[in-house]
Image (cartoon, rainbow, N blue to C red):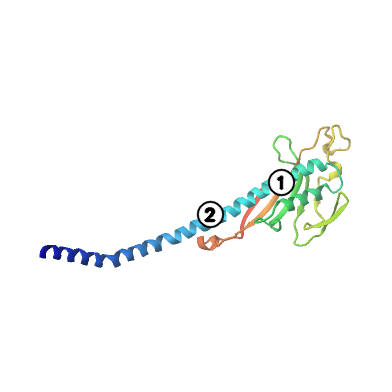
Amino acid sequence: DGELQETMIRLLARTICRRPASRGQALVEFAFVFPLFILLLVALIEYGFLMNATLAASYATRDASLIGAEAGTAAGADCAILKKIEDDINGPSDPANITTVKIYQADPVTGAINGSYVDTYTRTTSPTLSCTVGGVSFNLDYGSSPTLGYPYADRCNVLNGAGCLLGQTGLDTIGVEITYNYQWHTPLKSLLGFSGPGWTIVKA
């Protein structure tokens, strides 16, 4: 019985002595793992915002090209395209982060801009571009003096159309390009020591 009591006392003493050490080890491990976990969580959230902006810009260009094809040579065609882009890019993405929109005659094979046949609209901080589409008047946050190398009146929206650009007899392939300035949404920039305001997303 005496030996058994001594053995029990020794085991109890060991357990008591080890508890503080094990707790301290757990705290040290937690201190190492927790910052990494927070970093991964913040990176995942930032990546979600970035993917949202990328997909929103891609969807807006596709939608705007469809509007441009439907508008054809109608007055206010570009305004309808710009308005569609403004409507498609919404929270958490912000249309205020758009820098430029290009509406252009696209190469039917590559989809690239065909020479200088492109209208370039630069976004501003106030609505300065006056528009009238379908009898409805509104203003958009784009400069009132865009670079117009592809005016709506010269677009070919009918087969064998007269007075079309380049004198072609086929239909135009219209394209839209959006340049979007993505800005940081989380403290990831500070955590990783990055510089710069964000990324430039170009979608066509």
Q: CA distance from mark 2 to mark 1?
A: 26 Å
In the rendered view, would you say 95 is above or below 155? below
Give amino acid for label 2. Answer: Leu
Quadrant that contains the C terminus: top right
Residue 114, image quadrant:
top right
- Horizontal relation, residue 149 to residue 59: left or right: right
Badge 2 marks a residue whose secondary structure is helix
Numbered circle sitting on residue 35: none
Badge 1 marks a residue whose secondary structure is helix
Q: Nearer the viewer, residue 134 or 130?
A: 134
> Which residue is rendered at x = 62% and y = 51% of the image?
52
Q: Position of residue 74 (x, y in %)?
A: 86, 44
Q: Position of residue 69 (x, y in %)?
A: 79, 40
Residue 203 visible in the shown view = no
Q: Position of residue 76 (x, y in %)?
A: 84, 49
Q: Residues within 10 Å of mark 2 (few under 14, many from 20)?
A: few
Quadrant that contains the N terminus: bottom left
Of all residues, the one furthest to the left in this rendering is: 2
> Which residue is rendered at x = 89% and y = 35% of the image?
162
> Which residue is rendered at x = 28% and y = 65% of the image?
19
Of all residues, the one furthest to the front in this rendering is: 1
Give amino acid for label 1. Answer: Thr
Residue annotated with mark 2: 44
Q: Residues within 10 Å of mark 1 (few under 14, many from 20)?
A: many
Residue annotated with mark 1: 61
Q: Position of residue 99 (x, y in %)?
A: 71, 55
Residue 118 visible in the shown view = yes
Closer to the N terminus: mark 2 or mark 1? 2
